[in-house]
Image: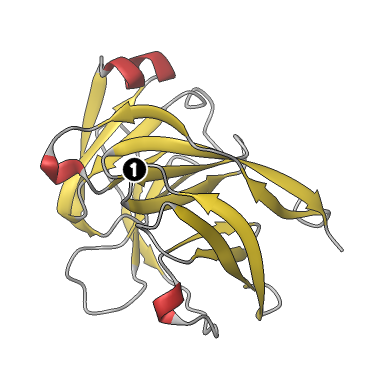
Amino acid sequence: SCNEETLGGILQPITHAWESAAAQKYGAWMMDPLPPTGDETKIYVLGGYTNARALWMYGNYADFVTRRRKTVITLPTGVGGTGHVIYNGTIYYPQYNTAKVNTRCTVQLAVNTGSVTPARSHNTWKTNAKKAKVGNTFFICGVMYSVEAHTILDNRVSYKYDTNTQEGDLISIPFSIKYGLLNQMLYNARHRAIFAWDNGHLISYPVEFQPSR
């Protein structure tokens, strides 16, 4: 649980799929850590990072790896970047070309009725992490972890910031980038793994935990 465990290690990545198109070097793939009933096996893919609007939904892992029977959901606004989250049947994503930093939009995935309901929310935190040393970030239990670079193969997680206590610490957890262009990292508590997009490859990193001090 969040109160009893903290990140102890990140294992070697598992490759699940590959998007060969040049425009798909960047993107995000996700599963819902708190899915509505019936959505437990669904996988969501959003390729691209500049004004992309097509969210692909697969009913199960077999359809995902074979690219069969996907549903295409058109988002009401384009996305900017790859920092998207699926939670309890809702996708949260940065809007493309917005004036406000850290703006998030939500879209309820009511595919069976075809309805789309937008909403907005945002939070910001001030950390002492050096921008030059932050290549990518992910959150586990309200703690932000930062990876030093997004292209260096032999890498490490070097900083963490607890949004609950607003305290930051330097750490050193070895981390490997397999394909040389890691542009999405998203921890999924239900699967205890980090979902990632690395140069068009859709991968996941199993994680290890240790008792909190």
Based on the displayed image, in which of its 4 quarters is residue 83 positioned? bottom left
Image side of residue 165 versus residue 199, left or right: right
Image side of residue 6 versus residue 118, left or right: right
Q: Residue at x 54, y 83 (%)?
A: 127
Image side of residue 46 versus residue 60, left or right: left
Q: Is residue 187 above or below residue 146?
A: above
User: Residue 134: x and y, percent?
Assistant: 44, 71
Based on the displayed image, in which of its 4 quarters is residue 143 positioned? bottom right
- Viewer-proximal residue, 71 or 144? 144
User: Residue 90: x and y, percent?
Assistant: 41, 45
Please identify the residue farthest to the front as the structure is shown.
Answer: 154
Q: Secondary structure at mark 1?
A: loop
Q: Residue at x 18, y 32 (%)?
A: 20
Residue designated by label 1: 179
Q: Residues within 10 Å of mark 1 (few under 14, many from 20)?
A: some
Total numbered circles: 1
User: Residue 182: x and y, percent?
Assistant: 36, 51
Q: Is residue 144 above or below residue 35?
A: below
Residue 112 at least partly seen: no
Q: Is residue 100 above or below residue 211?
A: below
Say how the picture is coloured. Answer: secondary structure
User: Residue 62: x and y, percent?
Assistant: 39, 14
Residue type highlighted by circle 1: Tyr
Q: Looking at the figure, which quarter contains the C terminus?
A: bottom right
